[in-house]
Image (cartoon, rainbow, N blue to C red):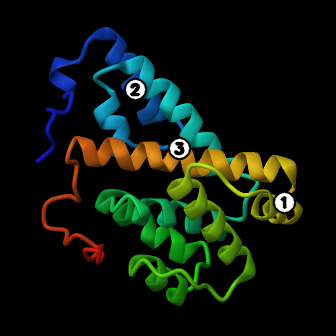
Amino acid sequence: MARVPLVSETNMTPEQRRVYDAIRTGRRKSAPVGPLAIAMHRPELAEAWSALGLMLRFDSSFAPRLREFTILLTGRYWDCQFEWASHEAEARSAGLSAQSIEMLRRGGTVFDAPDEQLIHDYAVELLDAHFVEDALYGRVRDMFGTSGVVELTALIGYYAMVALTLNAHEFGVPDGVAPPLPPRAR
């Protein structure tokens, strides 16, 4: 059970209704869920959050396989059950290998695909150390370009925000769904 009650259609303010309807009838084609459902308490935040998420998720310059790899990696880093549950099937559909998915699920650090390994190393160094060494940054820029390294950083940051919001408000997987992530050894 989430720590905050979700806004319901019966008790929305006019501003919440406007944002709710825009999200529901927009590209997502569904009512706000997960972090957007939580953000509906501040509809301006939900609206801005939705716009950024749409750009990063649906208009990304990254191949879907790499975008979903980054999302799962970030969700696993923050042990976010909902984020993982929401993206595992999409990652499979996007062509992410079962081996890479299981490596991420277990918190593994070695990937066969060089682009996945590079994204993993960049994301983990950024999240762990809060900075990225010049050599690693340069390798990411060389592989994905300047706009790519900027977008990759935004993708990691966005899904970290998603995970932290879901975790802080204890927004878990839906009832009847088993948590997909095992506890990590610390």
Q: Residue furthest top?
A: 14
Q: Is residue 111 left or right of residue 150?
A: left
Q: CA distance from mark 2 to mark 1?
A: 43 Å
Residue 160's spot in the image, x, y percent?
46, 48
Compute the Cα span from label 3 to label 1. Answer: 22 Å
Q: Amino acid at mark 3?
A: Tyr
Name which of mark 3 and mark 1 comes first in the sequence.
Answer: 1
Q: Amino acid at mark 2?
A: Asp
Residue to which mark 1 is pinned: 138
Q: 104 or 25, which is in the foreground?
A: 104
**SS class, disc 2:** helix
Q: Which residue is mark 2?
A: 21
- Quarter containing the C terminus: bottom left
Q: Residue at x 68, y 55 (%)?
A: 132
Residue at figure coordinates x 23%, y 59% from the top left: 173
Give left or right: position of 4 versus 59.
left
- Badge 3 marks a residue whose secondary structure is helix
